[in-house]
Image (cartoon, grey):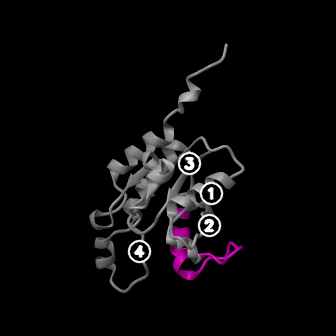
Amino acid sequence: MKVIFLDVDGVLNSQDLFERCGEELVPIDEENIKCLKKIVDATGAKIVLSSSWRYGWAQHSDEVQDWCQLLVDTLARYQMKIIDKTAYFSSGRREDEIKDWLEQCEENIENFVILDDGPYEWHRHGYDKFWVKTDFCTGGLKEEHVQKAIAILNKQPFWKFWKRK
């Protein structure tokens, strides 16, 4: 299985979008959703929410709070869904939360990518090679990020090239 660890603020939305929307619900940029869809379509990856938006789900439940329903509904319009969420650690170290999810996952993880604008310590677990850095101030997820994410997710691990005789 290929996995996209998805942040929302700074990936699916941006400063410009917040300014244009004013007091409305926290926005999701449809253009950024289309970019995410390109990644999913090109790789078959599943989405795991690593964003602080994961707090919008009731603990131990699939019940979604109203402000997160926008994300669920927008993803669904593009035939995408969140399959899981990373756990919350009080340290706030997103890289540790992703590491924990990968260790707990019962499926074989072929590859993963982290879509995030946050300057976490990705290098601590070697995740900097899997991180596609977006920017809240410049529009979030864009075409250049799409190509990088697809390349990471579709890269063959080196052991796939080595065959025993």
- Reading the image, the residue beneath label 3 is 45
Residue 138 on the magenta segment? no
Nearest to viewer (mark 1 / mark 4): 1
> Dot 1: within a 10 Å radius of its alpha carbon, few (fewer than 14), some, or many (20 or more) residues?
some
Identity of the residue furthest to the top in this view: 165
- Reading the image, the residue beneath label 1 is 101
What residue is shown at x 50% (from left), y 38% (from top)? 154
**Which contiguous range is marked in magenta?**
57-77
> Dot 2: within a 10 Å radius of its alpha carbon, few (fewer than 14), some, or many (20 or more) residues?
some
Reading the chain from its start, which is encountered first: label 1 or label 4?
4
What whole-number distance in Å separates the C-alpha atoms at marks 1 and 3?
16 Å
* Callout 1: SS: helix
Q: Are marks 2 and 3 in contact (CB under 8 Å)?
A: no
What whole-number distance in Å separates the C-alpha atoms at marks 2 and 3?
20 Å
Q: Are marks 1 and 2 in contact (CB under 8 Å)?
A: yes
Q: Nearer the viewer, residue 99 or 5?
A: 99
Residue 60 on the magenta segment? yes
Residue 18, can we see it?
A: yes
At label 2, the amino acid type is Ala
Reading the chain from its start, which is encountered first: label 1 or label 3?
3
Q: Quadrant of the C terminus?
A: top right
Reading the chain from its start, which is encountered first: label 2 or label 3?
3
